[in-house]
Image (cartoon, rainbow, N blue to C red):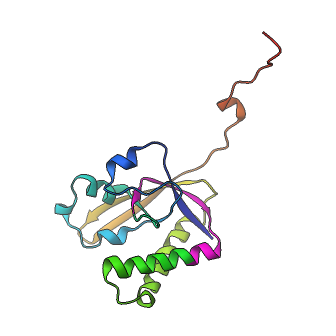
Amino acid sequence: MNLARTIHFDESDTQVFHRHARTGEWAISGGFEFSNWGEADLTGKARQAFANGWLGLETFGRATFVAVTKAEPAEVEALTQALARHFVTVYGAPSDAAARAVAESEIAHMAELCDDHDPNTLLIVSRDLTEAGVREQYRTIKAEAAELAQVGVHGDIETP
């Protein structure tokens, strides 16, 4: 199964989110965090997290970009357990068992977003607050194979 890990091209996530995800964390959309938000909640760093932050599943911080990669079954199981535990400790789910179905659904949604993409494809999320609730849209940036000539200069060290 494909899922996605957070990726950073610079340090901007450390500046724009209250809590930023570490590079390489498995991530999901995490739009559930905003399900009861209104316009008054959309200010400052919270607005940035709402507008385009993926949710890292270790720190539960946010990242602007994620990259598609293969996840092993044992990793998926650990992520599901961790997310279910998060639902219990942060959102008050009555038990890990009760939260598991929701965690499985969130992981499955992310897998669905990733499964049709090649490894290293970047995903970007954008959210809008509508009268019907939070609307998420996703964009992709394909990983292009760069030729060595594009990133390096080749020469003969014997020639002056």
Res. 10 in view: yes
- Residue found at the far left of this picture: 40
Question: Which residue is nearer to you in this view: 32 or 56?
Answer: 56
Q: Which residue corresponds to the image point at 42% horizontal and 43% vertical from the top-left?
A: 11
- Note whether 37 is above or below 126 in the view shown: below
Which of the image's four quarters has the C terminus? top right
Q: Which residue corresponds to the image point at 40% horizontal and 65% vertical from the top-left?
A: 60
Does the magenta segment cover residue 63? yes
Whether residue 58 sits left or right of residue 135 in the image: it is right
- The quadrant in which residue 86 appears is bottom left
- Image x and y of residue 5, in percent: 53, 59
- Image x and y of residue 14, in percent: 37, 49
Whether residue 118 sits left or right of residue 112 in the image: it is right
- Image x and y of residue 34, in percent: 30, 68
Q: Residues in magenta?
A: 61-77
Res. 108 in view: no
Q: Which residue corresponds to the image point at 71% horizontal and 34% vertical from the top-left?
A: 148
- The quadrant in which residue 78 appears is bottom right
- Note whether 109 is above or below 146 in the view shown: below
- Residue found at the far right of this picture: 158
Which of the image's four quarters has the N terminus? bottom right
- Note whether 4 is above or below 13 in the view shown: below
Q: How many marks?
A: 0
Does the magenta segment cover residue 69? yes
- Note whether 30 is above or below 13 in the view shown: below
